[in-house]
Image (spheres, rainbow, N blue to C red):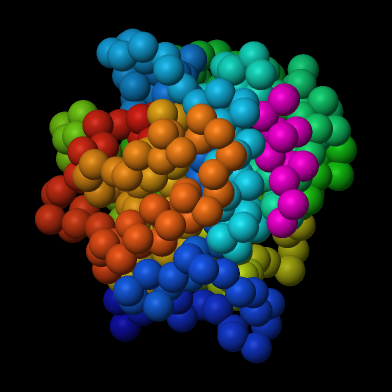
Amino acid sequence: MNAIQAFSQRHDPGRAVDPSQVEPRTGRLVDGFGRRFHYLRLSVTEVCNFRCAYCLPDGFRKTAPHSFLGVEEIARLANAFARLGVAKIRLTGGEPTVRGDIGEIIARVAATPGIDKVAMTTNGWNLHRHVAAWHAAGLTNLNISIDDLDAAGFAAITGHDRLDQVVAGLDAALALGMRAVKINAVLLKASAPESFDRFAAFVKARPIAVRFIELMRTGDNADYFAANHVSGAVLAAWLEARGWSARPRGFDDGPAMEYEHPDYLGRIGLIAPYGAGFCDSCNRLRVTARGKLRLCLFGEGGVDLRDLLADDRPDAVAERVTAALAGKSAGHRLHEGRPGDTRHLAQLGG
């Protein structure tokens, strides 16, 4: 069996879970395929201050008024989803930390009864200055986007020469004892083999997970995708050849298959949306910065929830969300080159 065949069989998040080790939870969010949803990715802005080549190579451009959800609306939304059995909320963007009230947002979400984990995904541009305050406000989990540990490569991808500051923020988060600190890195053809070595060295003595994410086709990046996409099988083969082994997924983990090695404190993972069975264990829903429920990152349209957030109406939100779940499809259609109406990842928070 070659590496690609092995990857297709093994990278199935649904098969990686050991049911005897999963904490049972009840919740009302179940779709027509029996998948249970206990994880919400909540975008708080579409604005991003980086110019990543695979997402916003020309930078963020305002196309509509910035009428993003306010703090009170976010608090009400978090409460409604918590009452539906959601225990983990991830704040995303764009870049969520461009909001001056992100600390207040974290605090309000963390204070929601039933919410056990408050996570955030950030490019880390000002992490070293504010991570202690965010942690004190209730931030428990942190994902930092670092696409290359080579300074020149980082600047070429992001448009900013800030790698040292981002790594300083990551190390500050580790020093605070946060529940989990992870790195997200987009898997790119040009840097793939060399970047594996750099990230493996980085996690040798750091108890963090680096997750490589297969480059995904969006509405705006067709040419870039064609030139830079590489299968996650390349990373899987690299890891297995060096003695790394796959570990079971936790109850509310995302879609990453993580690998561990006895000689390393950290882990290396793979998020492979083009791999077999990727959508089988989907456990998250998304709400956009303007209050629309998205059943799939690569779907179309959405269900507006914002009209129910003007006052506290969790039962009405619950009714609309559970009704919408009946229409969730079995999986995305990326294999057909159809990314839905997702123009770029900053639009919906990835």
**To which quarter of the image does residue 90 belong?**
top right
Tell me: residue 77, above or below residue 83: above
Q: Magenta region: which residues?
A: 103-114
In the orientation shown, which residue stands out farthest toward the left? 336
Q: Quadrant of the C terminus?
A: top left
Viewed as shown, does residue 307 lie left or right of 39? Answer: left
Pick the residue in front: 332 or 7.
332
Tell me: residue 169, above or below residue 323: above
Q: Quadrant of the N terminus?
A: bottom left
Residue 3 appears at what percent x and percent y? 35, 72
Residue 68 appears at what percent x and percent y? 46, 22
Please report the residue visible at 80 percent of the width from the left and 32 percent of the height from the top: 137
117 part of magenta stretch = no
Viewed as shown, does residue 252 lie left or right of 167? Answer: left
Tell me: residue 46, above or below residue 202: above
Please report the residue visible at 55 percent of the width from the left and 49 percent of the height from the top: 314
Please report the residue visible at 19 percent of the width from the left and 57 percent of the height from the top: 333
107 part of magenta stretch = yes
Viewed as shown, does residue 18 lie left or right of 3? Answer: right
Residue 247 appears at what percent x and percent y? 61, 73
Tell me: residue 51, above or below residue 319: above
Please report the residue visible at 41 percent of the width from the left and 29 percent of the height from the top: 290
Q: Is residue 199 visible?
A: no
